[in-house]
Image (cartoon, helix red, strand yellow):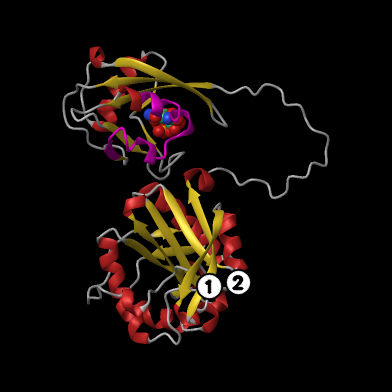
Amino acid sequence: MVADSLPPAPDTVTDAHDGLPDSGPVLTTARFTLRPLRSTDAEAIHRLVNDWGVVRMLSRLPFPYPRQLTDEWIASTATQMQDGRAWHFAIIDRESGPERLLGCLGIRIEAATRSGDLGYWVGRSFWNGGVAGEAARRLAHWALANLEIERLTAQVATDNPASASVLRRIGFREIGVGKQPFLARGGEHPVLMFEARHGDLFSPAEPAGTAITAPPVVPGPVRRRTVLVAACALVDSNGRVLLARRPEGKAMAGLWEFPGGKIEADETPEMALVRELREELGIDISEACLAPFAFASHAYEDFHLLMPLYVCRRWKGMPVAHEGQTLAWVTSEALDSYSMPDADKPLVPLLRDFL
Ligand SMILES: Nc1nc2c([nH]c(=O)n2[C@@H]2O[C@H](COP(=O)(O)OP(=O)(O)OP(=O)(O)O)[C@@H](O)[C@H]2O)c(=O)[nH]1
């Protein structure tokens, strides 16, 4: 259970209503479905959360936890989701026949810092079964690939080592110690503070120990195939650059990149860009409007990327995402707050100086 978990305290329930979240993202893991909350979940949620062992780890809940607050909170989650302020889910066990709710989890958005705060709890009878880890990993990956955030945060009471190790297993890093009021405990309590960025969650986990027992192996040169990709910084009349976010399901999902794609065997980079920008964005550019700007040469784990980056200020049509990407026009000052693939990182300061 993470301290800033759900449901909220009475004073934070400001937008209760009668409507129900009948739509919203539904995520699946190997064993669970994560779906928006329904009013019919209230009884199960109240039964599981109104338990001192659960409540004492959650910062915003009173104890005992009144049933009416559960109803109000469930109703408020629909509005929060519609407004993009928070995304709440019930963890449903798919293997148990009739729908069984095991816990809840959610992410509160802090738009100003482009970050989201992760919270979760699991009912006592479902502890030690890997529920929190499986659900939180899925939600964290989904959030960093789909929400307008570049960073996740979480806080865990210092006397809750099980939850801290869940976060570490997912890839969260501990960044310090703080204090947080815990309503049920009647005062402030120390918390471990965690954060995770794209690279923490999506790269393979570091091995636990670093002790070297075998003699060191001198690595030979690693041979990777070189992949040629042409990319383009489209710059609008306000000096903003178009970035496209890689959708879930693709490698490096959630990272922002310059539109473009692989150069086919019979293509020049310019021909590839004309084709890719038409396919991906529905715009027409002429090769004459593509100015070579810089290039990236970067070793990824399984291939080497060689990517010329062009700048283009003139095109026909309005860029529209045709391949599930999210598009953003980004000012040069804001470029740093968008997480980009490693290959692109050296290109960003060059582009910022140029714009
Ligand atoms: N277009 C583009 N690709 C980039 C950038 N930076 C970067 O590392 N890449 C990598 O270059 C490759 C682009 O190829 P692509 O767009 O044709 O391939 P993809 O993985 O999106 O999908 P696909 O192979 O299914 O078409 C991907 O591996 C992508 O991650 C960038 O700024 N723009």
Determine which residue is flagged by label 2.
Answer: 159
Whether residue 238 sits left or right of residue 330 in the image: it is left
- Name the one closer to the observer, 265 or 165: 165
- Name the one closer to the observer, 100 or 301: 301
Residue 48 percent coordinates (x, y) = 48, 80
Note whether residue 292 is visible: yes
**Mark 2 neighbour density, 10 Å: few (under 14) some (14–19) many (20 or more):** few
Determine which residue is flagged by label 1.
Answer: 189
Residue 10 percent coordinates (x, y) = 34, 79
Q: Earlier in the sequence, mark 2 or mark 1?
A: 2
Q: Amino acid at mark 1?
A: His
Q: Is residue 61 above or below residue 316?
A: below
Identify the image quadrant of residue 159.
bottom right
Q: Amino acid at mark 2?
A: Asp
Is 340 included in the stretch rendered in magenta? Answer: yes
The residue shown at (42%, 19%) is 295
Marks 2 and 1: CB-CB under 8 Å?
Answer: yes
Whether residue 13 sits left or right of residue 237 in the image: it is right
Identify the image quadrant of residue 33.
bottom left
Q: Nearer the viewer, mark 2 or mark 1?
A: 1
Is 170 included in the stretch rendered in magenta? Answer: no
Residue 17 percent coordinates (x, y) = 22, 75
The mark tally for this picture is: 2
The residue shown at (35%, 30%) is 258
The quarter of the rendered structure image containing the C terminus is top left
Q: Quadrant of ligand 1?
A: top left
Magenta residues span 327-351
Question: Secondary structure beneath disc 2?
Answer: loop
**Mark 1 neighbour density, 10 Å: few (under 14) some (14–19) many (20 or more):** some
